[in-house]
Image: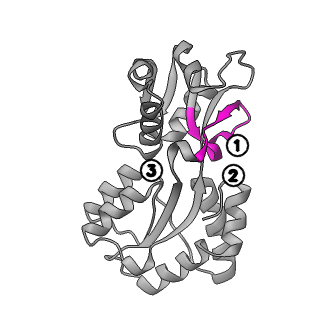
Amino acid sequence: MSDALEEISRSYSATTGEKIRHTFAGTNVLARQIEAGAAVDVFVSADTATMDALRKKKLIVDATVRIVASNQLVVIIPKESKIWVKTPADLLAVKRIAIADPDSVPAGIYVKNWLAAEGIWAEVKPKTIPLQNVRAALIAVETGNADVGLVYRTDALSSEKVKIAFSVPIEKTGAIDYPAAVLAGSSEQAAAEHFLEFVASEKATTIFAKHGFGAP
């Protein structure tokens, strides 16, 4: 998402002359910053649950919430790896599995829920390396600190050091949507809404697709 938003913002700035300043972190970290009063105008979340939690606390302008992109969970291995991982059950034979924190980070929560539904989370959990965000899980596989990683398709496609072993069907995880909205505490409401309109535009959707995201 950071790579895609940087490109989208460059395109927006080239058209409007307005500057966009980003703060990138795990969705849970950003939500805590917003709750603490961070000076934020637009929030892009990696899941709907976090956005809904902020809405309940009246920190989001409800009318501005929209889905801007979607994603898919994939299992990755190092580019030259000979490990055979084609099904969830194959993860039982793997020693080190990098995932985002399953207790707080959306990507990790998707992994946990998927493997729990497959009936193998209890067996796989001791093999996992919980990390602060999904990009950290990707890096762990790239550097050989993990044999397998569970990340978003977009992260896998951003790296030349890993390959996708298999993709997790959307029906197994549920929709992985990215909602965006203007913050109720924004001091630049009109400008924020204008930028958000661009993020949800056809042009931005094309940029998202370039980075591996699905349509809203």
- Tell me, for residue 157, which label it has, or none: 1
Q: Residue furthest bottom?
A: 190
Residue 21, above or below 49 = below
Q: Secondary structure at mark 2?
A: loop
Q: How many marks?
A: 3
Local crowd size for mark 2, using a 10 Å CA cut-off: few (<14), some (14–19), many (≥20): many
- Earlier in the chain: of badge 3 and badge 1, it is 3
Give me the residue at 38% from left, 62% from top. 51
Q: Position of residue 45 (x, y in %)?
A: 45, 59
**Residue 199 appears anywhere in the view:** yes
Instruction: Look at mark 2 in the image and give the residue it sits on.
Output: 212
Give the amino acid type for the residue marked by disc 3 in the picture.
Answer: Ala
The figure's colour scheme reads one colour
Gap in angstroms between the C-alphas marked 3 and 1: 19 Å
Q: Position of residue 94 (x, y in %)?
A: 55, 15
Magenta-span inclusion, residue 213: no
Q: Is disc 2 in contact with disc 3, using a CB cutoff of under 8 Å?
A: no
Local crowd size for mark 3, using a 10 Å CA cut-off: few (<14), some (14–19), many (≥20): some
Magenta-span inclusion, residue 155: yes
Local crowd size for mark 1, using a 10 Å CA cut-off: few (<14), some (14–19), many (≥20): some
Viewer-proximal residue among 23 and 63? 63
Instruction: Look at mark 3 in the image and give the residue it sits on.
Output: 25
Q: Quadrant of the C terminus?
A: bottom right
**What's the magenta region?**
150-170
Q: Position of residue 28 (x, y in %)?
A: 36, 50
Give the amino acid type for the residue marked by disc 1 in the picture.
Answer: Leu
Q: Secondary structure at mark 3?
A: loop
Q: Is disc 1 in contact with disc 2, using a CB cutoff of under 8 Å?
A: yes
Give me the residue at 42% from left, 38% from top. 113
